[in-house]
Amino acid sequence: MAKKNNGNKSKIRLAKEQKYNDKRWKDSHGNSKFLCLACLKSMKAPTKCCGFNMYNIGTRARPPKMRASKAEWKKFFDMFLFVRRDSNRSQAKKIIELLKEYNLPTLQEEEKLKKMVDTIENDIIGVLDIKRHEVVEFYPPYSHKTGRGVLDTILDRAKYFEAKLDYDKLEVGKEYFIVPMFASDYNHNYIPTDFKKYDIQKCKIKRIPQKYSTKHTIGFNIMTGNSKEIVEQGYYPHSKYGYRQNFYIFDSRVNALAFRQDFLTAVFPILKEKELPYLSEIVATVNLDFERVTKKAPEILI
């Protein structure tokens, strides 16, 4: 009796998959690819090109070569180009322009853009928020020996885990000091391109009642400058237009200065590698913070 050949089923399934996802576009290494929506150059890192943020096309796609036919580019855009949740308005407009140029439908993308324009509350950028076009993304390498990211090891040396205060013991009405750092999302880190984002913020504690519960959550009423913003401590509270910086809070300015100079010293190699425009300001700030702490509380630096 002849054996049943089940190989045809897998071949038919594979043919259907290839119909919608050309194998030439797959990235065998599983890394994200980025596309410039202006010149259509593709890169492996999310650096800026032509003055725009690169468009993340994900891990499953690889753009055609720039000299590829218009039909191939049209097929690629039809499969992989759309307005995502993390897209900003300028990027959404550019995506719609490209789709129209290649005679592709744009109704859904235009509706998404309209929601962006109409959603005013998501357009508000707070003191500890970094605008999406004012960041440099950093993907910390992973160490198989320690099972942790390299950035975690750097921040360990910067007393990252020793700096926390017990939130349950924070006193309402007392002044505290916030030291902002990078924003982060899973294995991504977002480094601000504006040096002022490392400024220490003075705040007071505010108890915020939770909806549908008798419990309260901690809020930080920022008092620096003219801002009266209340920042709630949350887990990756990003909006469409900004990333929330991670931060630590201290009960004295001298402790905040000591941590900031330690943190900036530890991450300086990363900032230098990314060629941030404020390297000289980092050096001056670290030296100034060190002098202030040495005069007021030298025992902190031991």
Image (cartoon, rainbow, N blue to C red):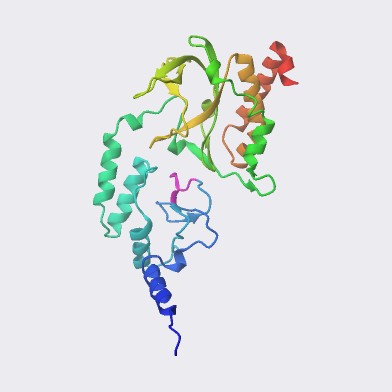
From the top left corner, tell me how far across and down residue 159 is, in percent: 66, 28
From the top left corner, tell me how far across and down residue 3 is, in percent: 45, 85
From the top left corner, tell me how far across and down residue 262 is, in percent: 67, 27
Q: Is residue 285 visible?
A: no
Q: Is residue 177 above or below residue 173?
A: below
Q: Residue furthest bottom?
A: 1
User: On the rendered structure, is 154 left or right of 198?
Assistant: right
Of the pair 33 and 172, the residue shown nearer to us: 172
From the top left corner, tell me how far across and down residue 295 is, in percent: 71, 12
Q: Is residue 32 visible?
A: yes
Magenta stretch encompasses residue 49: yes
Of the pair 124 and 51, the residue shown nearer to us: 124
Q: Is residue 35 above or below residue 171?
A: below
Q: Is residue 292 above or below residue 70?
A: above
User: On the rendered structure, is 282 left or right of 105?
Assistant: right
Magenta stretch encompasses residue 22: no
Dominant SS type (magenta): loop
Q: Residue furthest front?
A: 1
Q: Residue furthest top?
A: 173
Q: Quadrant of the N terminus?
A: bottom left
Image point 63% across, 17% down: which residue? 255
What are the residue bounds of the magenta stretch? 48-56
Image point 55% across, 15% down: which residue? 169
Q: Quadrant of the C terminus?
A: top right
